[in-house]
Image (cartoon, rainbow, N blue to C red):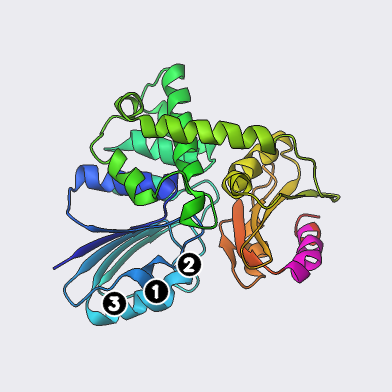
Amino acid sequence: MTHYDVFNGDADGLCALHQLRLEQPLESVLVTGAKRDIHLLERVHARAGDSATVLDISLASNRAALEAMLALGVTVQYFDHHFAGEPLEHPHLKATIDTAPDVCTGMLVDRHLQGRRRIWAVVAAFGDDLEGPALALAATLGLASGQLSALRGLGETLAYNAYGDTLEDLVVHPATLYRTLAPHDDPFRLLQAEPLLARIAEVRRADLAQAHRLEPSYTLGRAAVYVLPDAAWCRRARGAFGNYVAQRSPEIAHAVLAPDSEGGYTVSVRAPRAKPTGADALCRAFATGGGRAAAAGINHLPEDELPEFVRRLEEAFR
């Protein structure tokens, strides 16, 4: 029998899996990809009697593949905080879904493990740009301010590596990054021992230094839109830059677009920090959109739909 660990390649997916495997070591086949590569269950070729753990990918986006796996007799444990669609019940499925805007998958795993690997849930929350929940979790651990800064930096570094339209855009494959984490139960020792983390952080600093010089392409009443140049650094910077401008102007929504290989755009949307809801509903109005209430995106927005997107963005956060 084979076990599959299927996880989003960002900080949340990485740290959620890391918590579980620190507590429940298990030989598994890793199935992951870039942050936008969310239809991961289609890559799982499981048989009757196999099992899978699925972390931080939308059940709604993977429903058909999940139902096919369950019908074969595959046992699935599912943790996620994205839009899930209609509830799915099956004797072989144990799903923990919470779409609240102040929750990430790492926090759901933390609840499941009753806090036994909580420091990694803090990293996950920082990586998912949930500073308030991250600080609340960290308060239970008695960490010093320097340790908090290190965990925030680690979360941001892990999250940054997942952004890009293809694996070639990333600094390192997310499966390789997970294998770098796996031997370390202490994130502070990880940071000291693994130069790969410093390498990703340096790429992040260089990319964002360029992004921070950009001005909005569209300034709306309650939103701002940035259309980035067609370059690998822009595809990597898209999400982190979205978080930066959302923090800088918390009363308005933001959209960050980067050209994709199909002649359109990949879109990151951030709801206003002051009222972090509505991003997922806006993005689901487009064919390849999804995400969560505070932060969502569109995998491919055709160029001729850009005016309609801008119109809907303004309406959604008016």
Q: Where is residue 117 in the image (x, y as percent from the top left)?
A: 29, 37
Instruction: Check residue 155 in the rendering and tell me which mark sits there, or answer none.
Output: none
Residue that carries the numbered disc 1 in the rendered image: 88
Give how far apart the Cα atoms at labels 1 and 2 are: 9 Å
Look at label 1 and name its amino acid.
Answer: Leu
Q: Image quadrant for the N terminus? A: bottom left
Q: Element under label 1?
A: loop
Question: Is any part of residue 114 visible from this angle?
Answer: no
At numbered mark 3, what does the secondary structure look like: helix, strand or loop? helix
Residue shown at 17%/48% (left/top)?
Answer: 25
Is 24 on the left or on the right of 213, as rendered? left
Q: Residue 70 carries which label?
A: 3
Residue 17 visible in rendering? yes
Part of the protein shown in magenta = 303-313
Would you call the spot at circle 3 few (<14 residues within 10 Å), some (14-19), or many (20 or more)? Answer: some
Magenta segment main secondary structure = helix
- Work out which residue is located at the far left of the displayed protein and give it: 1
Label disc, if present, on residue 84 of the rendered structure: 2
Q: Does the magenta stretch include residue 113?
A: no
Q: Which residue is drawn at 63% across and 61% down?
A: 260
Marks 1,2: beta carbons within 8 A = yes
